[in-house]
Image (spheres, grey):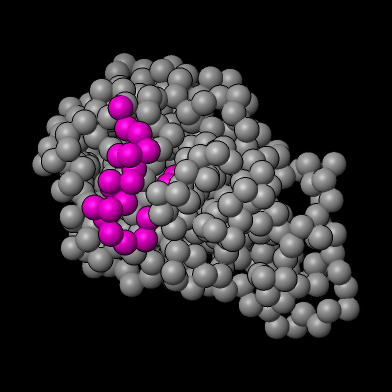
Amino acid sequence: MRLQDCHNIADFRRMAKTRLPYPVFHYIDGAADDEVTKDRNTSAYDQCDLVPDVLAGVEEIDLTTRVMGHDIALPLFLSPTALQRLFHWQGERAVAAAAQKFNTWFGISSLATVSIEEIGESITTPKLFQLYIHKDKGLNRMMIERCQAAKFDALALTVDTIVAGNRERCLRTGFTSPPRLTPRSAISFASHPGWTLNYLLREKFHLPNLDTHVAEGSNVAISVADYFNTMLDQSMNWSDAANIREQWGGTFCLKGIMSAADARRAVEIGADAIMVSNHGGRQLDGSRSPFDQLREIVDTVGGEIEIICDGGIRRGTHVLKALSAGATACSGGRLYLYALAAAGQAGVERSLGNLQAEIARGMKLMGKTRIDQLSEANLRWR
């Protein structure tokens, strides 16, 4: 399969599956328990329909959207995801460069495989850091201070990983960071020599935002579930979130809000934005999709805080539905991770280009020239 034959995210997924050893592919592709929520994140968009207007003069359209104090060129950005250099040797560098090319937000994870400082220096477009609160308070403080020094534009506190979800595909494949060689995985690594040679011969894999305090994940192989369950602070509460917002002092987002009551609490502690997200279905299986919850949250805090619909995006029309339902913008992870795994920076750029074209075409077909013209009047719910 060639890059030019990838016309949608499903095409990139198929290409990624051929490029990656099976433990790595299933880490991206998998989710918790029966993966019902992961599938629902996308299928929820099928439960409502777009109602277009016509004869609206749509030769020129404007996709510019203001998110967390910055104007971006399309109402979609790249959620922070961990361990990107396992998916392609270019890792976060490729995704950051693609985000800059399309003038949109790029988020990196605490478990990123390039440093806060490198991302801070490499792109001028808006950048967000996803903070996991560790038991090691010194590590938390250090990451915040490094983001401040690197002039990150926003901090997103992840609030839905108090324990790890039951990711059964990872249990079956034995996925760890760094990858652990087993008799079964060795066969898959050997049958993907391009990936394996890049992993072995390029710079050593590590987690540069953590490895000054934590050996696990860089020098000691550990599953993501074991990392979350042993390293992260399960006592984190709303008071802690407010303290982190104060320590950060800049634009502050809570990632993983799913209830209207929690959205109200986010407003009360002074958050600037919330990401309505269930962690890609990787945490609580059986929970609702972000799009399912969007209207309830918009009804509760719309106009008081920015609301980002995160997860399940596979088409430009999904973005238009979320915006019509009241979201400020959308974001996602797998929508670019499959493309990264398939073809590095070129893959991410093609995926973003495809989605940008779908959003623009959908806007014209709906008779809209600006994002702020989208509203629930454009939707009919089944």
Q: Is residue 175 visible?
A: no
Of residues 308 and 272, which is closer to you in this image?
272
Q: Quadrant of residue 59?
A: bottom right
Name the residue: 20% across, 49% down: 143
Name the residue: 70% across, 54% down: 325
Q: Please, which residue is most extreme toward the front here?
A: 268
Q: Is residue 49 visible?
A: yes
Q: Is residue 285 above or below residue 11?
A: above
Q: Is residue 67 above or below residue 55?
A: above
The image quadrant where one finds the C terminus is top right
Image location (x, y in percent) of residue 27? 43, 32
Q: Is residue 291 above or below residue 115?
A: above
Q: Please, which residue is most extreme toward the left here?
A: 212
Image location (x, y in percent) of residue 60? 70, 83
Q: Is residue 113 left or right of residue 362?
A: left
Magenta span contains residue 239: yes
Q: Is residue 60 left or right of residue 297?
A: right
Q: Quadrant of residue 369?
A: bottom right
Of residues 265 and 295, which is closer to you in this image?
265
Name the residue: 39% across, 41% down: 158
Of residues 165 and 174, which is closer to you in this image?
165
What segment is highlighted magenta in the picture?
Answer: 235-255
Q: Is residue 325 left or right of residue 122?
A: right
Magenta span contains residue 45: no
Name the residue: 66% across, 57% down: 326
